[in-house]
Image (tube, grey):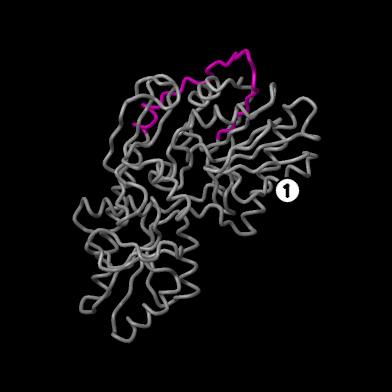
């Protein structure tokens, strides 16, 4: 198999704890491994999931574009930083410029860019018709980690850039996946197909006809208490490419070191789950009970795969999440459908009437928010959070 960027040979890295147990008929396969390019250090997920499967997922299951006002405040600050970076590096600034926003989602960038004097912003999402004309700048923030074939997409975008125009891409930073991460294997999820370092981004830009002029390692704050490592690159369309690889990053070594740490965390999760089971047994030795696993993302899917591997999956009776789009899905061997938050009212009432005891185990990045929700709305339900507790990156960094 060859690298999706430079065409060099790739090395496959297989790890049991990378794999996830996904619901029946889920668009994405949880049986993933990693391909690592031996030349440009590009890393990508490998599974049976097709490009059509990913498109189906983003249409029906992805919820990142459904962000409330408190998140829009953070997004607005983020896009202001993006505009400042472009204005400082584009001769003449952003006044009266035209910008193409690829993968724009909530269209918030349009509003921010206009405040910098931009003449027009064209929004272009994956799968949509290709815009006509050319642009002074093309930006794409946190899209390329989701693209099945990044190389032809960037080449196509570069064709839409005027000579000496600029392209800006921001993605999660593979080189800092180990830096104050927020959960075991959190960056190696099902949504992120690609994992970029400065080395692979440099090669991507070079082959697309872009001269790299800026690399910026920052934090992308996505919630009041959550951020993650980001690498932002800015390139200029040029007939003469003088790009140099500014990184001695060894992706193979990095991933192996990450796996040592993350595998230990999975052992902690396993011990934590056994501890919860023992606690439940002590509390209800003669009482009929049910265990709910709350939080259905890659974090929980990976935990469920571990339970299946250890033979403990039968201890989970109900699978739950507040996202109603997950309602009706079932896990292999599961006796109950996934339910949304409102269903807990009926579920708790049913258990109370029959003198049964309900326990909730949370396996999610936003475990604090989930626990607070149960404390306010369902104070009689016992809630446990699986260790290791997810880390509040933003407060840890400040």
**In front of the other: 202 or 348:** 202
Residue 304: x %, y % from top left: 29, 54
Quarter holding residue 280? bottom left
Q: How many marks?
A: 1
> Residue at the location (73% across, 48% down)?
111
Residue 219 in view of the camera? no
The verdict on residue 348 being magenta is: no
Quarter holding residue 326? bottom left
> Residue at the location (44% across, 75% down)?
378
Q: Quadrant of the C terminus?
A: top right
Q: Residue furthest left?
A: 311
Relative height, residue 175 to residue 326 (above, below)? above
**In front of the other: 165 or 248:** 165
Left or right: residue 281 compared with residue 214: left
Residue 350 in view of the camera? yes
Relative height, residue 202 to residue 96 (above, below)? above
SS under mark 1: helix
> Residue at the location (80% across, 39% down)?
117
The verdict on residue 242 being magenta is: yes
Residue 17: x %, y % from top left: 29, 43
Relative height, residue 340 to residue 123 (above, below)? below
* Residue denoted by label 1: 111
Left or right: residue 189 compared with residue 222: left
Relative height, residue 200 to residue 393 (above, below)? above
Disc 1 packing (10 Å; few <14; some 14–19; many ≥20): few
- Segment tinted magenta in the rendering: 231-257
Left or right: residue 146 compared with residue 92: left
Q: Quadrant of the N terminus?
A: top left
**In front of the other: 345 or 95:** 95
Residue 396: x %, y % from top left: 54, 46
Quarter holding residue 92? top right
């Amino acid at each position: 198999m060859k690298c999706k960027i430079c065409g060099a040979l790739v090395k496959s890295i297989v790890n049991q704890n990378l794999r996830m147990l996904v619901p029946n008929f889920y668009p994405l396969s949880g049986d993933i491994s990693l391909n690592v390019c031996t030349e440009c250090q590009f890393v990508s997920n490998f599974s049976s999931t097709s490009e059509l499967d990913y498109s189906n997922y983003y249409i029906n299951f992805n919820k990142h574009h459904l962000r409330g006002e408190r998140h829009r405040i953070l997004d607005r600050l983020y896009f202001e930083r993006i505009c400042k970076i472009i204005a400082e590096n584009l001769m003449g600034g952003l006044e009266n410029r035209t910008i193409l926003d690829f993968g724009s989602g909530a269209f918030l960038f349009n509003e921010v860019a206009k405040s910098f004097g931009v003449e027009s912003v064209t929004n272009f999402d994956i799968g949509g018709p290709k815009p006509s004309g050319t642009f002074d700048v093309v930006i794409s923030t946190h899209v390329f980690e989701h693209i099945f074939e990044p190389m032809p997409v960037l080449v196509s975008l570069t064709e839409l850039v005027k000579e000496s125009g600029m392209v800006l891409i921001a993605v999660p930073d593979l080189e800092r996946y180990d830096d104050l991460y927020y959960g075991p294997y959190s960056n190696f999820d099902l949504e992120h197909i690609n994992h970029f370092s400065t080395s692979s981004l440099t090669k991507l830009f070079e082959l697309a006809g872009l001269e790299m002029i800026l690399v910026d390692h920052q934090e992308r704050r996505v919630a009041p208490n959550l951020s993650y490592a980001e690498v932002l690159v800015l390139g200029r369309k040029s007939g003469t490419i003088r790009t140099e690889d500014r990184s001695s990053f060894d992706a193979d070594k990095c991933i192996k070191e990450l796996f040592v740490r993350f595998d230990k965390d999975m052992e902690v999760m396993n011990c934590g789950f056994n501890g919860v089971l023992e606690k439940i047994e002590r509390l209800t030795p003669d009482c009929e009970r049910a265990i709910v696993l709350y939080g259905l993302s890659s974090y929980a899917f990976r935990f469920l795969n571990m339970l299946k591997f250890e033979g403990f999956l039968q201890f989970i009776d109900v699978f739950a999440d507040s996202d109603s789009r997950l309602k009706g899905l079932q896990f292999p061997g599961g006796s109950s459908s996934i339910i949304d938050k409102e269903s807990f009212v009926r579920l708790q009432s049913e258990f109370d009437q029959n003198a049964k005891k309900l326990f909730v185990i949370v396996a999610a990045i936003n475990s604090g928010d989930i626990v607070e929700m149960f404390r306010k709305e369902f104070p009689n339900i016992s809630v446990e959070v699986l260790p290791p507790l997810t880390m509040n990156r933003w407060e840890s960094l400040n």
